[in-house]
Image (cartoon, helix red, strand yellow):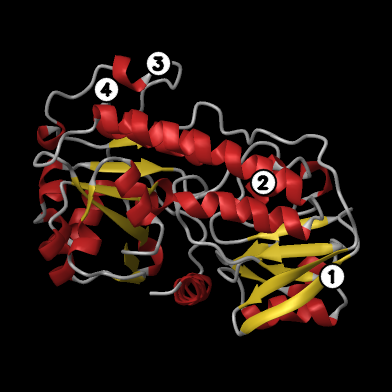
Amino acid sequence: MSVRSARLLAVSLAAVLAVSGCATAVSSPTESPVASASSSIPLAQLDLLADPLSYVGPSTAVLVDAAVETITPNAEQTLPATVTSHDLDGDSSVTVTSTERILGIDMSGSIAATIFGLGFGDSVVGRDVSTTFPSAVDLPVVTTGGHSINSESIIALRPTVVITDGTIGPIDVILQLRDAGIPVVFVDTEPSTAGVGELARQVSAALGAPEAGETLAQHLTDEIDAKVAEIAEIAPADGSKLRMLFLYLRGSAGVYYLFGSESGADELILALGGIDVAGEIGWEGMKPMTDEAMIAANPDLILVMTDGLESAGGIDELLVTKPAIGLTTAGQNRRFVDMADGEILSFGPRTPAVFDALARAVYAPEG
């Protein structure tokens, strides 16, 4: 599957969520997960599980510090900047003349986080529902019904540039912003560890600060590589690796999706030292869960978004609603690891911290 195809799948999922009106969780889990160990302790020094395969019960991955670090606080700019916009129907040329009022929107909050990491946070005028880190949380939200936008709410913010990736829409509404005279730049990167650096480069180019983007890209690449290596030291060896699956839930709307290859979930699982069982059964992109697929995958551990789990009524209700999940090893052991919706798949400046928090929840849930 190409990157562009993956983006189209994400757009389709966003449309389903918007129509379903599933932005808000409606209930609480019936069982309180264990929070992950403090990130002040190196992974190797944690009270690690002797046998992660035999652990019973849920856990929660928590970022001790959810802030986005600014790596290039005094980035040099050259404007106007003419860049290639990777529109869904083909590349186009867009010229950005001002970055005084920036809006970065996507399904995972990664673009906004990257803008803040580049040092342009003070110029950001709004946010999507997935952008939840502290320095952005008080900004006006431009998404409704989950990941749907309307042009009027954005135009009212008077942005001088909008940066997006096509995973939020409807796309026709995004393109209406161009008709209103607002430069709209589409970035096109994989939801992956490699894509983190490329996202920094493309976003910085749109802001007229390519050198800052290169600096941020290298910094994040080094941090990610170091964290993945650290996790590999505590993860079980081949033969004892956890079989993991990412399940996207919006129970109040009846939305249950398995995330497979090129969705970002596969990269997340590999970074955690697990086996991506969705990819193992040939699951590509994001597709509605079927009982057959869930049973065939038979994960040892299921990754979920916190609000998603709550919207399904917690683990007890989820296993009643979807009994096929209860037939898996993960279901029988109630082995769910949840993390905040705006964090778990946000490939961007917080990726090293996300990997760290998840590793703690997986391998040291009682640390």
Q: Earlier in the sequence, mark 4 or mark 1?
A: 1
Q: In the figure, is residue 184 to the left or right of 361? A: right
* Circle 4: residue type: Glu
Q: Earlier in the sequence, mark 3 or mark 4?
A: 3
Q: Which residue is mark 3?
A: 41
Q: What whole-number distance in Å separates the C-alpha atoms at marks 3 and 4? A: 13 Å
* Circle 1: residue type: Thr
Q: Earlier in the sequence, mark 4 or mark 2?
A: 2
Q: Which residue is mark 4?
A: 366
Residue located at (40% from left, 68% from top): 253
Q: Position of residue 240 (x, y in %)?
A: 11, 38
Q: Earlier in the sequence, mark 1 or mark 3?
A: 3
* Circle 2: residue type: Glu
Q: In the figure, is residue 272 to the left or right of 7? A: left
Q: Secondary structure at mark 3?
A: loop
**Camera-side mark, 1 or 3:** 1
* Circle 3: residue type: Ile
Instruction: Assess disc 2: are there few (<14), some (14-19) or many (≥20) residues with their C-alpha within 10 Å of its C-alpha.
Output: some
Residue located at (46% from left, 49% from top): 193
User: Relative to 76, does residue 280 appear above or below in the rendering?
Assistant: below
Q: In the figure, is residue 33 to the left or right of 84? A: left
Q: What whole-number distance in Å separates the C-alpha atoms at marks 4 and 1? A: 52 Å
Q: What whole-number distance in Å separates the C-alpha atoms at marks 2 and 3? A: 30 Å
Q: Quadrant of residue 359?
A: top left
**Camera-side mark, 4 or 1:** 1
**Residue 95: numbered disc:** 1
